[in-house]
Amino acid sequence: MQRLPIGPLYYEFSRHNEPRLRIQPGETIVVESEDAFSGQIRTNDDRRDRVTKPYGNPQTGPILIEGAEPGDSLAIKIHSIEPLIGQCATRVPPLHTLAPWLGTDCPHGTHVCPIRDGKIYWSDKLAIPYQPMLGCIGTAPDTGVPTTFPAGPHGGNMDIIEVAPGNTVYLPVFVPGGYLYLGDAHAAMGDGELSAAGLEMPAVSTITVDLCKSRKIPGPRIESPTEIMSIATGCPMERASAEAFAHLILWMEADHGWDRWRAYDLLTHVARISVGYFPLGTVAAKIGKEYLPLA
Amino acid sequence: MQRLPIGPLYYEFSRHNEPRLRIQPGETIVVESEDAFSGQIRTNDDRRDRVTKPYGNPQTGPILIEGAEPGDSLAIKIHSIEPLIGQCATRVPPLHTLAPWLGTDCPHGTHVCPIRDGKIYWSDKLAIPYQPMLGCIGTAPDTGVPTTFPAGPHGGNMDIIEVAPGNTVYLPVFVPGGYLYLGDAHAAMGDGELSAAGLEMPAVSTITVDLCKSRKIPGPRIESPTEIMSIATGCPMERASAEAFAHLILWMEADHGWDRWRAYDLLTHVARISVGYFPLGTVAAKIGKEYLPLA
Amino acid sequence: MQRLPIGPLYYEFSRHNEPRLRIQPGETIVVESEDAFSGQIRTNDDRRDRVTKPYGNPQTGPILIEGAEPGDSLAIKIHSIEPLIGQCATRVPPLHTLAPWLGTDCPHGTHVCPIRDGKIYWSDKLAIPYQPMLGCIGTAPDTGVPTTFPAGPHGGNMDIIEVAPGNTVYLPVFVPGGYLYLGDAHAAMGDGELSAAGLEMPAVSTITVDLCKSRKIPGPRIESPTEIMSIATGCPMERASAEAFAHLILWMEADHGWDRWRAYDLLTHVARISVGYFPLGTVAAKIGKEYLPLA
Amino acid sequence: MQRLPIGPLYYEFSRHNEPRLRIQPGETIVVESEDAFSGQIRTNDDRRDRVTKPYGNPQTGPILIEGAEPGDSLAIKIHSIEPLIGQCATRVPPLHTLAPWLGTDCPHGTHVCPIRDGKIYWSDKLAIPYQPMLGCIGTAPDTGVPTTFPAGPHGGNMDIIEVAPGNTVYLPVFVPGGYLYLGDAHAAMGDGELSAAGLEMPAVSTITVDLCKSRKIPGPRIESPTEIMSIATGCPMERASAEAFAHLILWMEADHGWDRWRAYDLLTHVARISVGYFPLGTVAAKIGKEYLPLA
C-alpha cells in the first residue's frame, strides 16, 4: 500500500504543482497530512505565527489518478482518519461576528488535547468523543487556483462533518490526473465550526480512490451508509442551500428515477441539512437512502 | 382541562386582539389550530385561494397568562401534537430560488396525505414517519406587530423541527399577559422546509404553560431531553447563526457557570445546528446537556 | 394650510392609531416631526436614554387621506424640509460591523450642529451643504404593523436621499384613509448612512398629498425632475437590488411602453443605484427620464 | 510608447503566465484588450459559444513592472479608453434573480452598437453617452489564482464605473513585477451592471503605471479629480460595504490626519457609494476631496 508522507505544505488546490503520488483507479493509499496550523502548535505554549505561515490548512498532494480526465469524477472512500501524534490542538481566535454580544476581549486560548481511547481530552473534566473528519479535500480546477480557504465545486475547505470514515466523497475531475489534495483533519467538529479553529490534528488517512469515467458531477457529493448528500457553498447560505437542494434533486432524478418536482416535494418533508464553516456558507442537503427506491 | 377551539384565524402576533383564553401559570391546556392553508385544502382537488385568504399560517390565540409581565418569560412544555382530522395536505409551489437549476414548469402538486399508525401516507409507495411539530409559536411584541410570515425574538414562524412533543419552548413576555399564539402544525418537516409548503395539518396540541418570573431572555429557546438550544433568525443566515451561538454562549455563562470564551471554544467542537425555513434564515444553535455541568 | 404639530411620538406605522389630521386629496399641508433621537439630544452634553425612549425614529401621523382605499396609491410631493430649531444632532455609536478593522473603542461622539445659510456646521472647520431628506415616510399596512426600524412595501425607514424637496414619493395604500406617517428628517445624509446616526433634526415639511385612484404599486417609488426610481429593501442587498430593478422594469413596461427585456437590457447600461441605510439593504434603482420616451 | 496588442486570451490573474511586456515605473503604455465575449460577437447574427470559450472577460497581460515588490502598490493613471473597432456588443442573458417578477422567457437579444461622436447607438432611437470604463483590472496574488469572474483585494472583475479615463486606480503588488492585467472594457455601464452583459468592446487603453514603493494597501483604491474611494467585494453587499468604508476611514487616518471615529462620523453624512456588478457585491465607498484637509 503506497503511503504519502507530509511533504511540501501546499495552500492551493493547484494544477501547477508536481504530482507527489501516482495511483491507479481503485487503489487504496495512506495519506499523512499536517494540521491546519501548519504544525506551529504542538504545546500549550506555542502560538500561531502568521509571519512564517501566513495561510492555514496546508494540504498533502497532489495525487495523480491515472486515466482521470475532465468530465470524470473521483469516488474517495474514507476508511480511517487517525491522529499522527496522539493529540490535536485548538485556539480561540476573536470572532468579530460575535462581538456585538460577547465583546472582543477574548483571552489567549491555545491548548493541546491528548487523544486516546476514542476520546479527546479537551480539559481535565471534559472529554469529547473522537469523531474525526477532513476539513479539506479537493481536486484542482482547470481555470483559477483556489486557496485552501474557500470551498467550491472542486471541494476545498468544506468543513462538513460527513467527510468522515465510512463515507465516500465524490469530486469532479477538471484536469487530466485529477490532482487530489487533502488535509485539515479535525478530531471532532461542531456544526458550523464556530471559531474556525477546530480540534486540528496531524493525521493519517486511509482512502480508496475510484474513478467514475464520464460521470460529470456539478460539485461535491457524499454518500454515507444511510444518506446521500449534495454540497454547495457561498454567501448567503440561503443561496447555497438552494443550490445544494437543486443538485440533490437532479441527482435523484438522474440516478433514482425521481421526477424532479416530486423529489422537491419530498425533500421539503424529510431532508436534513448539515452546515459547514458557517461564514463560508457551506451546506450539505441530505436525504435518507430508504426513500430513494420509492419514486 | 381548558380547551381552545379553532376560532378567528389571526395572521398576526398582535397585542391588539382580545384574549380568547385566560390561564394560570402552570396550567395544562388543549389548543386546536387550523392548518397553514387556512383549511382551504381538504381534498386533492382543492386549491389555495389567495383572494379570500391572502396570508398563510393562521394562529390560534391569543392566550393570556395571568401574572405575566414584560421581562418574564414563558416555558411552554409540548406534550402532544395530534392531527385533528386524520390527514395533512401539501402542495408544490414554484420556487424561483431553484429556477436556475430546475426551471419553473412546476406542475400542480396539491395532495392530501392520510395519517395513521404513526405514518404519513405521502404516496402509495412512500410513508413518512409522523414527527409532528409546530411551525409557529409566539408572543405579542410591545412595539410592532409581526405577521405570521417572519420569525424573531417573539418566536413566530420559526419552522424549527424541535418545536415538538417532549420539548419545552421558552419565549419572552413583552406585554402583560404574554398573549401566546400557536399554529402551522406540520405532520413532519425536513430541515429548511424547502418548498415552504410542509405537511400542513389542522392539529390539537396539549401544552403546559409555565411562567418564569423576571427571567428575561433575548429570544426563543428550546430544551429537549438531551439538548438546549438558542434560536435566531434573519438574513443572511451567517448573521443569524452568529446571533444564535452568542445567545447560547451567554445562556451557558448565566445558568451553567461557563466562561464565555471557554463555551465559545467548546461549541466549535460539539455544537449542532438546526435550520428552519431557509429563506428566512432561522437557525437553532444547540449543545448536548452532557456538557453543561463540565464548565 | 393645515399644520400638524409634533404630537404623540409613534414608533409604528400602525393602522390602530387615531388619525391626527384628515386631508383632501391634493391638499398641501405642513407637518412637524421630532428628530430620530426623540428630542433627547439638544446640547452636546445630552445623551441618548434608551430606558425612557427605547425606540428611535418617532413619526408624526397618522394623516388620513379622504377617499383613499386599498389598491390606490399616494403621491407625496415634497416642497420643503426645514429645521425646526435651527440645528441638528448626531452621535457616533459603535458599529460592530466595522470592528474587525477599526476596533470598538469608539469614544463618546454626541454633538449638535447649527444650521444656517444653507450649511450644517459639523465642526469649527467643516461645513456640510444642507441637503435635507426624510429618513422615514410610510403608510400603514393592513396586516402586520412595522416599527420605525425596517423599510418595506409600505415605505418606512428607507433612508434614501432622494426623499427630498423637489421630488415626489409614491406609496401604496393598504387601509382606508392610507394612514400616512413621516419623520426622521436628516439635514444631510451620506449614501448608506454608515453609523445609522444621521444629522438628525426636528423638522417642518411642506408636502402636497395626491391620491392616485386604482393605481396599485408594489412598493415605494420616487420621481425627481430628472429620474424615476423604484425602491426595494431586504437582506442581502443583492436580492433587494434585483427586486428594485424588476419593479422599475415593470413600471417602464406599464407606463412608458417599454418591452420588459429591452428595458432590462437598457438598464444594464444606464441605470443608477442609490443605497439607503446599508445594513437594511434598501436600494433605489433609477433611470434618467430622457430615456423613457425612447422605447 | 510601448504598445501591447491583444495576444493570448487569459482568463486568470495568474503569476504563472510569462510577462508579455516589461515596463519601467512611470512609463506610459498603450494596451489593447479583447471584449468580454472573447470577440465572438461582431455582428447581430453572432452568438456566444461557450464550448470554444467557456469563460468570459479575457485579459491582456501580464505586464511586469520593473522593481515592483510585494508590499508595494501600483498607481495606474487611465488617460483614455477608446473603441478598437468602432463598436461594442451586448446581449440579454436570462437572469434568474429577476425571474420571480419578469419570468424567464427572455428572447435572444444580441446586438451590436456602433460608437461614434461620443455616442453609443443602442437602437435607431436611442443613443447612450460614451462613458468608457474597464470592467477588469488587477494584479496577480501570491497565493491562489483568481479567474476573471470574481473581484477581490487584487482588483479583478470589479465593474466599477470609476475605473475610467481621468482617474487613477491603485492596486496592491503581491508578487515581484506585479503582473498587471486588464480587459473587459465597457463603452458605458449602469450601476450594478444588471444583466452582466455590458456594452462590451475591444478597446485600446492608454495608461501610465507608477510604482508606490513600500506602500501597502489592503485592496483597490481609486482617485478621481474630485473623490477618493476604497473598493471591497463579497456577498452579502452589506459586509462588503462595511469593509469598503473601514478601508476608506483608515486611509483618511493614515494619509490625511483624520481621527478614525471622526472620519466614521463624517462619512455617515457625506459619503457616496458606487455599486459594481451587484451579484458579486462589489462596492466603492467614496468621499469628496474637499473634506480631506478639514480633519
Image (tube, coloured by chain):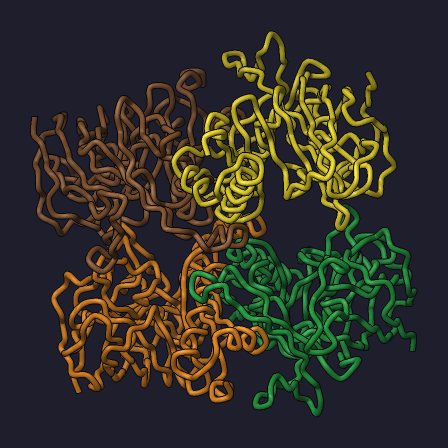
Chain colours: A green, B orange, C brown, D yellow
Q: Is residue D158 above or below residue A165?
A: above
Q: Nearer the viewer, residue D34 or C101?
A: C101
Q: Residue at x 33, y 23 (%)?
A: C224
Residue C65 occupies quadrant: top left
Residue D111 occupies quadrant: top right
Residue D140 relative to residue C173: left or right: right
Residue C126 relative to residue A155: left or right: left
Residue C103, given in percent of the width and then of the height, sits at 50, 54
Residue B283 relative to residue D256: left or right: left
Residue D31, given in percent of the width and then of the height, sits at 77, 22
Q: Nearer the viewer, residue B237 or C6?
A: C6
Residue B81, given in percent of the width and then of the height, sits at 32, 80
Q: Residue at x 17, y 27 (%)?
A: C206
Residue B269, given in percent of the width and then of the height, sits at 59, 76
Q: Nearer the viewer, residue A249 or A225?
A: A225
Q: Residue furthest front?
A: C124
Residue D29 appears anywhere in the view: yes
Q: Is residue D89 above or below residue A82?
A: above
Q: Residue at x 63, y 72 (%)?
A: A91
Residue D110 appears anywhere in the view: no
Q: Residue at x 86, y 51 (%)?
A: A16
Residue B62 occupies quadrant: bottom left
Looking at the rendered structure, the number of numbered marks drawn on it comes to 0
Q: Quadrant of the N terminus of chain B?
A: bottom left
Q: Nearer the viewer, residue D176 or C212?
A: D176
Residue C32 relative to residue B183: left or right: left
Q: Is residue C290 above or below residue C155?
A: above
